[in-house]
Amino acid sequence: MITDPTLMNLFFVNLDGVRVLGIDDEVTIPEVHIELERLVAGCPTCGVVARVQGRSPVRLIDLSMAGRRIALVWNKRRFICLEPACEKITWTEVDHRIATPRFALTDRAGRWATFQVGAQGRPVCDVAEELGCWLFR
Ligand SMILES: [Zn+2]
């Protein structure tokens, strides 16, 4: 079992600025919990430094590992803009390296699935079954 946080990050995520918080393997699909290491964020509309308002865990279908389906749980921070005149008000973190907002798959799982269907000619239902998509409903 890997317990060293640096090795866990390299093995499970391998993205700069992403920290693995832990792995929950006492659920149907093991969950790798992550967060972004960035401490300060600016409002995407006005640029004022934002305040963290809370977290919203987002559960994503990730690549299988060693024959086991894996879920990536991204503990996204919710921010609030401190500029009263700004119309943005609140938002959550976005990092397209992890996943596109409102997508069910991680970016790497989406790329893998696209390759399997587009280049390998596999049926979508087979790829979805391999990733365990039906378990995420
Ligand atoms: Zn703002």
Image: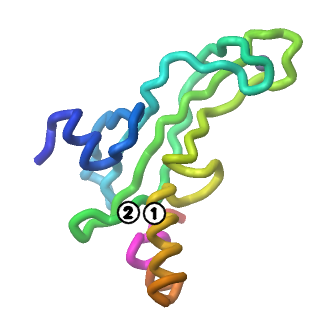
Which amino acid lies under the numbered mark 1 shown in the image of this protein?
Ala
Which amino acid lies under the numbered mark 2 shown in the image of this protein?
Leu
Report helix, strand or loop for mark 1: helix
Image vertical order of residue 1 relative to residue 116, above or below = above
Residue 22 image position (x, y, % from top left)? 28, 38
The quarter of the displayed image where residue 71 is located: bottom left
Whether the residue carrying mark 1 lies under 8 Å from ligand 1 is answered with no
Q: Give the position of the C terminus as an image quadrant.
A: bottom right
Residue 19 image position (x, y, % from top left)? 35, 33
Q: Residue furthest left?
A: 1
The magenta segment is: 129-135
Nearer-N-terminus badge (2/1): 2
Image vertical order of residue 58 relative to residue 77, above or below = below
Q: Is residue 10 left or right of residue 49?
A: left
Residue 48 image position (x, y, % from top left)? 72, 12
Q: Is residue 111 left or right of residue 53?
A: left
Distance of label 2 from label 1 (alpha carbons): 5 Å
Marks 2 & 1, CB-CB < 8 Å contact: yes
Q: Residue furthest front?
A: 119
Badge 1 is on which residue?
109
Badge 2 is on which residue?
63
Report helix, strand or loop for mark 2: strand
